[in-house]
Amino acid sequence: MSAEVREAFEKAVRVSGAVGAQLSIVRGGETLDLVHGLANAELSLPMTEDTLVQCGSVTKVFNATMIMSLVEEGKLDLDVPVKEYFPEFMVADPKATSTISLRHLLTMSAGIDNGDYRDFGEGEDAIARRVASLRTLPQHFSPGRYFGYSNAGTDISGHVAERVTGTAWDQLLRKRVLQPAGLKHAASLDRDRVFHRVSVGHALDKNGRAQVVRPWGLTRGLGPAGGTFTINARDLAKFARVFINSGISESDERVLSETSVRTMMTPQIDVPVHYQAVSWCVGPCIQDWNGVKLWGHRGGNISGVSYLYWIPEKNAAMAWVMNTPSVLPRFEKVIVQEVMQAAFGFEKPEIKPPALPVKIDPRRYLGTYDALGGRCLVDVVDAKLVMRRIWKDFVNEAVELEETVSLVPLGGDRFLMDRGEAADPLALVEDTAFVGDDSYGSAANLISFVFPYSRANGRRS
């Protein structure tokens, strides 16, 4: 395994231009750790196996694990409305405010918008202030009805844990997850990161030269969703072993009960965009690659991206972190296809147009779909269904980004996103999907990548 995996990993770095990366693979009793490049190109500091890299939304699995430990103790219940744990909780929709539960939040089915990325400081009240700012957060559909990814929802769940324990989220994470799981190369606070090697983020200029990214990361108020957590690939793979081993860590300490692990790995809601997953569970998602099921999560932040997979039928796990988010698509394709094939004998299938064209009624999809962070406009251009997507840069929300793609029907309400001549042949193709119906028979919502949008004005425009 080692030589083939190493060769594929080096190819991922080479074709993408990633400045620094780590890969950790666990298969049975065998472990392989690989590392490449620099943790800081300005200072020529090498990436090492122990270097911490921002992991972004993979943090959500850690957050769910911490919450499940409180469920085991009877301090929380997945199905009790959040409002019962702190009465001042509020989002824009009164009915959703009274019914949203932790299960809705952790399975991405609460129906609330993704929210913004404002900075609420670095104090221990940061998450509380973030949650208080969500009182007007738009509701895209009723809780539990569909899948719709929300960073804001995860932050709400983390604050619930703070409220019932009286303890800051970062301390809960360390005490209830990092320590019992034996994860010594992980930190969510700057004051803890000073005791580790830490990577900065990079972007490539037009000549391919690495430039350090500033600012380094997001705010503490987004901690549960992935705003601050850093880890190395080896500890990320070690964390996966908790789920493979029914709640027991590599050091034989129980992190969760078998019942909690089963709960976290049980499908809860279907995901209409299959590039990301086929189902979402309580924290992780499930992917199905030609009949092989993987559990895990992906993540991205300003200075790092990460993936975590565990594959029970192979008694295996794979984790990687990389410090050049802008080159993720090329890096990812080689990892999920060639590295996975070399390590485990299977790979992520590509989304391809059907052999025969799928007939659709384009009128169902035409219109404008809004979310707090952007807008999608769907129209017919030159006899093709086209989506113009406009969204805010999450680092600087004053900056708007835009792209236009053709939508190729895949069946049902799911479409391949065809970028035409602008497509990168070294990256995987994504899909998008519409869900629900309005009173006119048009699609009520759009899931773009993983984020929910609602038809403007609640009707066909």
Image (tube, rainbow, N blue to C red):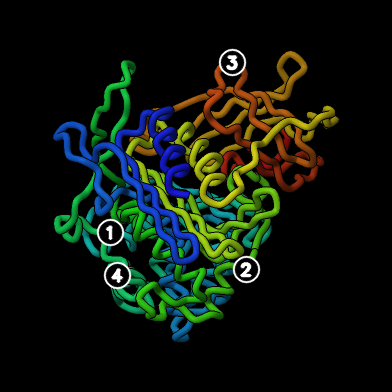
Q: Return the residue at label 3.
A: 421
Q: Looking at the image, which is closer to me, 159 or 68?
A: 68
Q: Are marks 1 and 4 in contact (CB under 8 Å)?
A: yes
Determine whether the residue tagged by mark 4 lies in a helix, strand or loop. helix
How dense is the environment of label 3, judged by Cα within 10 Å: few (below 14), some, or many (20 and up)?
Answer: few
- Label annotation for residue 419: none
Q: Return the residue at label 2.
A: 266
What is the x, y in percent for residue 17? 36, 28
Question: What separation in Å lies between label 2 and label 4 (alpha carbons)?
Answer: 25 Å
Q: Return the residue at label 1.
A: 188
Residue 95 visible in image: no
Question: What separation in Å lies between label 3 and label 4 (alpha carbons)?
Answer: 47 Å
Q: Looking at the image, which is closer to me, 302 or 148?
A: 302
Does 253 sit left or right of 124 as displayed? Answer: right
The residue type indicated by label 4 comes to Arg
The residue type indicated by label 3 comes to Glu
Determine whether the residue tagged by mark 2 lies in a helix, strand or loop. loop
Q: Return the residue at label 4.
A: 174
Q: Are marks 3 and 1 in contact (CB under 8 Å)?
A: no
Vertical comparison of 268 with 150: above or below: below
Residue at (41% x, 77% y) in the render: 255
The residue type indicated by label 2 comes to Thr
What is the x, y in percent for residue 263? 58, 73
How dense is the environment of label 2, judged by Cα within 10 Å: few (below 14), some, or many (20 and up)?
Answer: some
Nearer-N-terminus badge (1/2) = 1
Nearer-N-terminus badge (1/4) = 4
Residue at (64% x, 30% y) in the render: 417
